[in-house]
């Protein structure tokens, strides 16, 4: 019997419904508020909606995998875990935006907040669907909202340039993804990932074999742009520099996480028949490993020459994307080993990147330019701020007692476990290279004379945001066990299984 | 591989040449209005190809939406805004050589794959997709992405307004 939307239990969609209704409501509130009124209330309301959605996601853990309308929407451990990361990241970005004041967006503050919500909605849909159409619509919703958020400070030339580059390259990458998807659909005759996987399994070894690889290749090129792997990373530094810092943090954390979830889902579900094939190891795995190695090498070496703090963070995030690709490249051997190491790294990355961006925002704003020299003598002006920044940088560099250390440690051990010694060697060497530029900032803070004696003004909201970042970075660094056991206990095989669609319990 | 010179083949040949020419003109034209017209031309030819593939509904939609609405909107946009005729700085020859090589490699790869593995196609089931069925699947199976598309359109609208709005009073 054909099913319609109302046959399903819509309570599982609660997080998305909260976000979409908050976005709709906020756009109306924005309209009704007097023009002179501050739009901060909209930001607070948006933050509340994100937190509420987070509560719903937390309550849904342990739920049976469930799907609506032929997997156009599904929840399983995979989507819940990623959704939790996305929501945490967006909540942080909201806090950050509320702290950094309204002069950034002038009269467009209301729009700024609800576009953040729609971007989040797109990201959440991307992680909780197993249908190409929904995945693509979610991706476009996220991308389109991000283009606008990057260009929203339209008075500034650099923001316009960044938005332009982002729109053009984002459009190209979407075209590549769509082209790849069209080959997958043409071969399988369905947009459902499980159905595609079934048809691919039948088609392997036949004449369609090359087409399967072609579709995968095209999709990976598109994703490469979205995640900013190395051959397709050129946009990232310009966009991070031109966008306001909260948005740069949003792109580095939320967009990247959603794009990763998208690739994993498509690879693991639709292209799983390829993994049993010898050519997976020979072609795809190698391709990914080379991309990962290139991202780590180029990201870290180009970062050495950067003098702008946000550009430096952009190159550092390209390198981090390289580290994150590693578990995927070695996926064919031990599939479910992938999740714990990768998700731990993502969570650690969230805290440390977020914290670093918040500190950068207030220090560079105080100095009036975005150069690294803005950090000169910070330890004498605001010792606590300097200490927090040092912690984030140490964590990004991957030294012990921080979240970043365990993140890298698990990635490297899982790579060694998969017998890819050369890749582990690249990871370790590039990490050592990265010490140079991370400690360049530390050197500025502790060993150079300050340009003024005044404290760097940090609003209380930003203090909370920094404390959250510090808490997460140290907490995961000292006690990684709870999160690891939690991730380890989740039922990752549910990603691959057909979910029930019957009546809820 | 042998070609049969049927009417269908000739029509396909003419339409695809038109579509490609339109696209090439669009890239090479110096005036925006010429670009918009060549793009409309390409859209129109693609509608013809849809018709050849017996996707009549798609062909009509293509003409209505792309050739009609999108092109007209673009023309309006061009006419209602000011344009300075600017000499574009010529792109360095290195740059164009590299991009030519990259696109050439991609094209070669695609063609290689397509010719290496000829797909055995079954006879397509004709008249399988009526407008009614299309509507049914959009509003039944694909209702979630459909609703999301409306959010997407809203976002695009809001974005267009805030980016294009002139802020007078300060």
Image: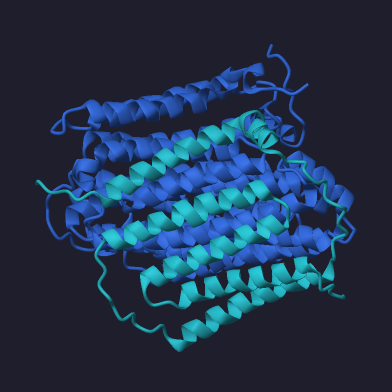
Chain colours: A blue, B cyan
For the residue pair A212 and A338, the one nearer the viewer reads as A212
Residue A68 occupies quadrant: top right
- The structure residue drawn at horizontal position 64% and vertical position 68%, both measured from the top left corner, is B15
In the picture as drawn, the residue positioned furthest to the left comes out as B170
Q: Quadrant of the N terminus of chain B?
A: bottom right
Residue A26, quarter of the rendered image: top left
Please indicate, yes or no, whether residue A400 appears anywhere in the rendered image.
no
Residue A358 lies, in percent from the top left, at 32, 46
- The foreground one among B79 and A478 is B79
| For residue A206, side relative to residue B143 (left or right) | right
- Residue B89, position in %: x, y? 34, 82
The residue drawn where x is 68% and y is 46% is A266
Q: Is residue A495 above or below residue A446?
A: above
Q: Is residue A435 above or below residue A142?
A: below
In the picture shown, does residue A293 fall above or below B51?
A: below
In the image, farthest residue toward the bottom:
B93
On screen, residue A159 versus residue A347, left or right, reads left
Residue lying at the far top in this picture: please name it: A505
Which x, y percent locates residue A53? 47, 25
Q: Is residue A84 left or right of residue A40?
A: right
The residue lying toward the viewer, choosing from B79 and A287, is B79
Q: Residue at x 61, y 58 (%)?
A: B47
Count of picture labels: 0
Residue A163 visible to the viewer: yes
Q: Position of residue A384 (x, y in %)?
A: 27, 43
Q: Is residue A326 above or below residue A51?
A: below
A253 sits left or right of A216 in the view:
left
Residue at screen point 41% across, 45% down: A145
């Amino acid at each position: 019997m054909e099913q319609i939307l109302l046959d399903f239990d819509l309570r599982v969609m609660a997080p998305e419904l909260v976000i979409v209704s908050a976005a709709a409501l906020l756009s109306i509130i924005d309209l009704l508020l007097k023009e002179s009124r501050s739009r901060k209330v909209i930001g607070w309301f948006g933050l509340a909606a994100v937190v509420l959605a987070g509560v719903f996601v937390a309550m849904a853990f342990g739920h049976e995998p469930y799907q609506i309308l032929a997997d156009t929407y599904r929840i399983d451990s995979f989507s819940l875990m990623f959704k939790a990361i996305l929501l945490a990241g967006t909540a942080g970005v909201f806090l950050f935006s509320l702290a950094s004041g309204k002069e950034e967006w002038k009269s467009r503050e209301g729009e700024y907040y609800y576009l953040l919500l729609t971007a989040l909605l797109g990201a959440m849909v991307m992680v909780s669907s197993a249908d190409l159409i929904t995945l693509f619509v979610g991706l476009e919703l996220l991308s389109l909202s991000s283009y606008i958020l990057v260009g929203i400070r339209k008075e500034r030339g650099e923001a316009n340039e960044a938005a332009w580059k982002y729109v053009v390259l984002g459009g190209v990458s979407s075209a590549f993804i769509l082209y790849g998807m069209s080959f997958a659909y043409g071969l399988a005759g369905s947009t459902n990932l499980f159905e595609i996987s079934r048809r691919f399994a039948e088609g392997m070894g036949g004449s369609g074999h090359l087409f399967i690889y072609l579709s995968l290749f095209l999709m990976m090129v598109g994703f490469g742009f979205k995640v900013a792997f190395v051959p397709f990373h050129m946009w990232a530094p310009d966009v991070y520099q031109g966008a306001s810092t909260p948005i740069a943090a949003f792109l580095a954390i939320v967009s990247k996480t959603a794009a990763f979830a998208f690739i994993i889902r498509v690879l693991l579900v639709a292209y799983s028949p390829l993994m049993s094939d010898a050519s997976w190891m020979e072609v795809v795995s190698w391709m990914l490993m080379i991309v990962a190695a290139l991202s780590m090498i180029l990201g870290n070496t180009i970062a050495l020459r950067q003098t702008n703090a946000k550009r430096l963070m952009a190159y550092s995030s390209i390198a981090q994307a390289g580290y994150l690709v590693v578990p995927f490249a070695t996926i064919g051997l031990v599939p479910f080993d992938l999740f714990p190491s990768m998700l731990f790294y993502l969570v650690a990355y969230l805290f440390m990147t977020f914290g670093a961006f918040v500190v950068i925002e207030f220090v560079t704003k105080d100095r009036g330019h975005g150069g690294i020299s803005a950090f000169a003598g910070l330890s004498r002006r605001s010792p606590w701020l300097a200490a927090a920044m040092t912690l984030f940088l140490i964590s990004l560099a991957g030294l012990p007692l921080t979240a970043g250390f365990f993140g890298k440690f698990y990635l490297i051990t899982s790579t060694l476990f998969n017998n890819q010694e050369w890749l582990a060697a690249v990871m370790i060497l590039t990490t050592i290279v990265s010490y140079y530029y991370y400690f360049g900032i530390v050197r500025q803070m502790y060993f150079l004379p300050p340009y003024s004696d005044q404290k760097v003004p940090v609003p209380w909201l930003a203090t909370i945001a920094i404390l959250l970042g510090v808490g997460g970075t140290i907490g995961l660094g000292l006690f990684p066990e709870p999160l690891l056991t939690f991730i380890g206990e989740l039922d990752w095989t549910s990603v691959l299984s057909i979910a029930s669609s019957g009546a809820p319990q | 591989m042998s070609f049969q010179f049927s009417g269908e083949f000739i029509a396909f040949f003419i339409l695809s040449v038109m579509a490609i020419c339109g696209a090439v003109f669009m890239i090479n034209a110096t005036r925006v209005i010429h670009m918009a017209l060549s793009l409309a031309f390409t859209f129109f030819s693609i509608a013809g190809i849809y018709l050849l593939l017996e996707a009549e509904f798609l062909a009509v939609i293509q003409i209505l939406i792309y050739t009609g609405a999108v092109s007209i909107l673009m023309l309006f946009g061009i006419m209602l805004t000011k344009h300075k005729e600017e000499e574009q700085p010529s792109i360095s020859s290195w740059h164009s050589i590299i991009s030519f090589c990259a696109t050439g490699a991609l094209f070669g790869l695609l063609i290689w794959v397509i010719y290496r593995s000829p797909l055995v196609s079954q006879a397509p089931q004709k008249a399988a997709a009526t407008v009614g069925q299309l509507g049914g699947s959009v509003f039944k199976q694909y209702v979630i992405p459909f609703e999301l598309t409306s959010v997407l359109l809203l976002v695009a609208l809001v974005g267009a307004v805030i980016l294009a709005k002139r802020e007078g009073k300060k």
